[in-house]
Image (tube, rainbow, N blue to C red):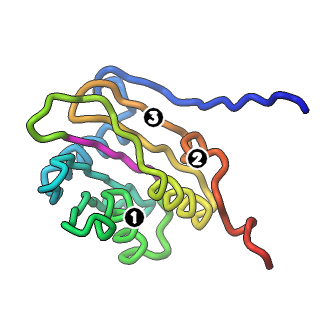
Amino acid sequence: MANQELKISFQSFEKIEDVESKLAHLLHVARNAVHEAYSPYSNFCVGCAVQLDNGQIITGFNIENASYSVCICAERTALSSAITQYPDAKILSIAISTYQQFQDNDAPAFPCGVCRQFISECEDRNENKFPIIVSGQSGPIHVFESIKDLLPFSFGKNDLIK
């Protein structure tokens, strides 16, 4: 059996001023969306902004629930809204930002496994890959070319029995 190597490619930036202007603007919108998050249990706020090819930017944020399994992540909130409001629009990019109340931590937090799978389905549905930007309220910014960099062995329509 041959060993195989998996490589993940992404760009890192220290300041938002170093990021391409369209992506920087989307990150700014995501950073603002964290302030709408409803996170009374974890105090971990997440905001997401989705840029569509029709010029619209749709935001979402995490919404917690005392019954934890009912919680919904910012990424799925924003993407569901975008797909519902503009079903024919293509997604051009996604920015995700986090903020932890009562704690200084500007390290980026990455999408959970469920959100990675959901984003992967969106890429497949649109038949195009799109950049994913992750960052805290400041600090390092990581830009991935595609969700496949974060979920290289995703489950998709080709895995289903026809």
Q: Give me the disc on residue 143.
A: 3
Relative to 107, is 111 on the left or the right?
A: right
Q: Residues within 10 Å of mark 1 (few under 14, many from 20)?
A: many
Closest to the observer, 67 or 148: 67
22 sits left or right of 98 in the view: right
- Residue in the image at 26% along x and 51% along y: 47
In the rendered image, which residue does mark 1 sit on? Answer: 79
Q: Hey, what amino acid is under mark 2?
A: Leu
Q: Which residues are magenta?
A: 92-99
Identify the mark nearer the N-term, 1 or 3.
1
At horizontal 52% and vertical 30% (from top left) the residue drawn is 10
Q: Is residue 129 above or below residue 54?
A: above
Q: Quadrant of residue 55?
A: bottom left
Q: In this rendered view, identify the residue nearer to me: 162 or 133.
A: 162
- Give the camera-side residue of 2 and 7: 2
Would you identify the image quadrant in which residue 138 lies? Answer: top left
